[in-house]
Image (spheres, rainbow, N blue to C red):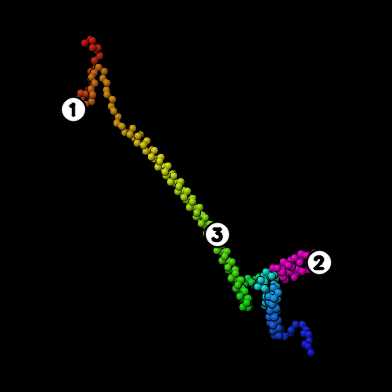
Amino acid sequence: MGRGRVQLKRIENKINRQVTFSKRRSGLLKKAHEISVLCDAEVALIVFSTKGKLFEYSTDSCMDKILERYERYSYAERELVAHDPESQGNWSLEYTKLKTKVEILQKNQRHYMGEDLDNMSLKELQNLEQQLDSALKQIRSRKNQLMHESISDLQKKEKALQEQNSQLGKKLKEKEKEIAQQGQWEQPNQSQSSMTFLLPSQSLPSLNIGGNYQGRSNGGGEEEASAAQPRPISLMPPWIL
């Protein structure tokens, strides 16, 4: 005689209910994993216990991507039935979906911060570690890229400054050369003008009318005195004498 059909109803015994939940939850997660591997399907499973504890499974730990895809698909369906009067009363369902998504995002954020890790299994911790490692690799790659770009910019600025400095040095040398040439041209002119001003003035000989010219001699003081005295000027013509 075969086993009768089991009637589905709430288990009243709290302990039995908890044991059944634990067994059925494990089987459900196993089935979700099997259909994901065998059929190459993207599966997302979310289960909350009576105490509010969250249990989830997602293909390759892509829960966020699967939920985003579900949201896009649901949005496309809502656009098709936007004019349906029955769809106007689904705001409460939409609120529930958004609230669930926010809770998942908040939970993932706490996990990324290293919080609420006690309830995670070994596989979940390994998946979280892989996600963090991948994120760190991307962060390091982006940081190295920015550092290389910064170094390249600094090298370009350094090269531009060196070229500018070289041009200024050439202009300075040309200016010094012009100043030196100008000084060489001005020096002979200054020598000629100084020689003209330094020549001694020569005394002109004195002319005495009707007397004899007495030149300046190098004799004694008497000759100089006699030469300095004025000679008498004769006003009589020679034929009278």
The crowding category of the residue bearing disc 1, from other C-alpha atoms within 10 Å (few below 14, some 14 to 19, many at least 20), is: few
Q: Residue furthest top?
A: 240
Q: Between disc 3 and disc 2, whose residue precedes? A: 2
The picture quadrant where one finds residue 90 is bottom right
Residue type beneath disc 1: Gly
Label at residue 101:
none
**Image position of 89 (left or right of 63):** right
Label at residue 149:
3
**Residues drawn in magenta:** 68-97
| 33 up-or-down from 179: above or below | below
Toward the viewer: 144 or 239? 144
The spot of residue 41 in percent (x, y) is 70, 73
Toward the viewer: 234 or 120? 120
**Image position of 90 (left or right of 150):** right
Give the secondary structure at mark 1.
loop
Q: Residue furthest bottom?
A: 1
